[in-house]
Amino acid sequence: MSNPKRFPFIERRNPKGEANVFPCVPIALSYGDRTSEIFGLLDTGSSLNVLPYDVGLELGAVWEEQSLSIPLSGNLAPVEARGLAVMGQVSDFPPTLLAFAWVKSNDPPLILGQLNFFLEFDVCFYRSQLAFDICPKLRI
């Protein structure tokens, strides 16, 4: 990794009040002329990026204008999803086009998965240190 940025794991509580730590990265998402800063959960087990419904609305996206239906699996299988491409910027790295399954639910967090966050960024986890490094992929 060349010039990675290090981020700490963040503590989150479940509905029962139990705490755990997760690799969440601050990311600025832009769509049109709107930008939203949010924490995204880095999930190497997720096939794709997932955008909660309210975040898409905050960015100015219109559900009815998104025609690409995305089938989901696992606990999100019953949730309707549509494709939405937004610009994402982590730290001072160059903005990157990210493809999301925009879900009609606010239950899941913003998830950064294999398609396409992990195709655009290299990530190295140091769980014992409660930290992770990120840098954009090398462009050749």
Image (tube, grey):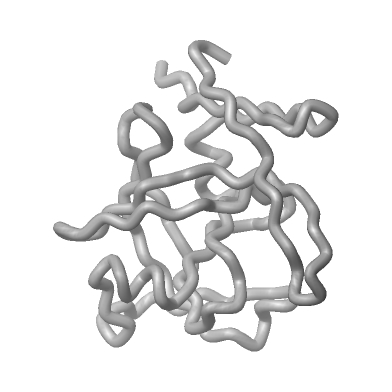
Residue 42 picture location, percent across and down? 63, 47
Residue 112 picture location, percent across and down? 56, 51
Answer with the quarter of the image where residue 64 lies. bottom left
| Residue beneath the point at 52% across and 23% down | 5
Between 13 and 131, the residue placed more toward the observer is 13
Residue 29 picture location, percent across and down? 34, 52
Taking the view exactly as shown, the residue that stands out farthest to the front is 17
Residue 56 picture location, percent across and down? 36, 70
| Residue beneath the point at 74% across and 52% down | 45
- Left or right, 107 with reference to 84: right
| Residue beneath the point at 66% across and 78% down | 76
Answer with the quarter of the image where residue 90 lies. top left
Please state, as top left, top right, bottom left or bottom right, where the N terminus lies in the image.
Answer: top right
Between 83 and 50, the residue placed more toward the observer is 50
- Left or right, 123 with reference to 117: right
How many marks are shown on the rendered structure? 0
Please state, as top left, top right, bottom left or bottom right, where the C terminus lies in the image.
Answer: top left
39 relative to 105, above or below: above
117 relative to 15, above or below: above
| Residue beneath the point at 27% across and 73% down | 61
Answer with the quarter of the image where residue 63 lies. bottom left
Taking the view exactly as shown, the residue that stands out farthest to the left is 33
